[in-house]
Image (cartoon, helix red, strand yellow):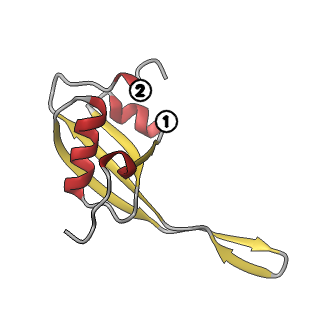
């Protein structure tokens, strides 16, 4: 496998927004992940880190927004977001009470 990433290096941070808290009620949790990670690696990382069973993983690559520095226009870096669906009955306690 050319994309060998340590499972703890795959997940960067949880995304906590209004939309992601609504999705948490549907057993879906949102994470920023390493752009090189594939769906299988993301699934294994979430199962290892939180001791839950993952039913499905959806990924989205977010394009960086343009920013201005004086007359120069630069772009923020691209990043990858993963929406992880858990098996009914499993929960990630990190997101509770947010």
Q: Mark 2: few, some, or many residues within 10 Å (few <14, many ≥20)?
A: some
Q: For residue 41, what is the image quadrant?
A: bottom left
Above or below for 24 versus 64 = above
Please state the horizontal and vertical placement of residue 86, each as a whole percent of the image: 20, 35
Residue plotted at (41% across, 26% down) = 95
Cα distance between the residues tagged 1 and 2? 12 Å
Mark nearer the viewer, 1 or 2:
2
Task: Specify the farthest residue to the right.
Answer: 70
The residue lying toward the viewer, choosing from 73 and 4, is 4
Q: Which mark, by number, is residue 34?
A: none
Callout 2: helix, strand or loop? helix
Callout 1: helix, strand or loop? helix
Task: Specify the farthest residue to the bottom.
Answer: 71
Q: Earlier in the sequence, mark 1 or mark 2?
A: 1
Q: Which residue is mark 1?
A: 18
Q: For residue 72, what is the image quadrant?
A: bottom right
Mark 1 near mark 2, Cβ–Cβ under 8 Å?
A: no
Please state the horizontal and vertical placement of residue 64, each as a whole percent of the image: 55, 68
Residue plotted at (28% across, 40% down) = 46
Relative side of 23 to 39, left or right: right
Q: Which residue is mark 2?
A: 95
Image quarter (top left, top right, bottom left or bottom right) of the N terminus: bottom left
Above or below for 17 versus 69 = above
Q: Mark 1: few, some, or many residues within 10 Å (few <14, many ≥20)?
A: few
Count of numbered tags: 2
Above or below for 75 versus 72 = above
């Amino acid at each position: 496998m050319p994309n060998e990433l340590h499972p703890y290096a795959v997940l960067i941070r949880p995304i906590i927004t209004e939309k992601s808290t609504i999705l948490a009620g549907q057993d879906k949790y949102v994470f920023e992940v390493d752009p090189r990670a594939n769906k299988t690696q993301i699934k294994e990382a979430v199962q290892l880190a939180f001791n839950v069973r993952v039913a499905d993983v959806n990924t989205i690559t977010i394009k960086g927004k343009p920013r201005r520095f004086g007359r120069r226009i630069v772009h923020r870096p691209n990043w990858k977001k993963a929406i992880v669906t858990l098996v009914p009955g499993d929960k990630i306690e990190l997101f509770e009470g947010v």
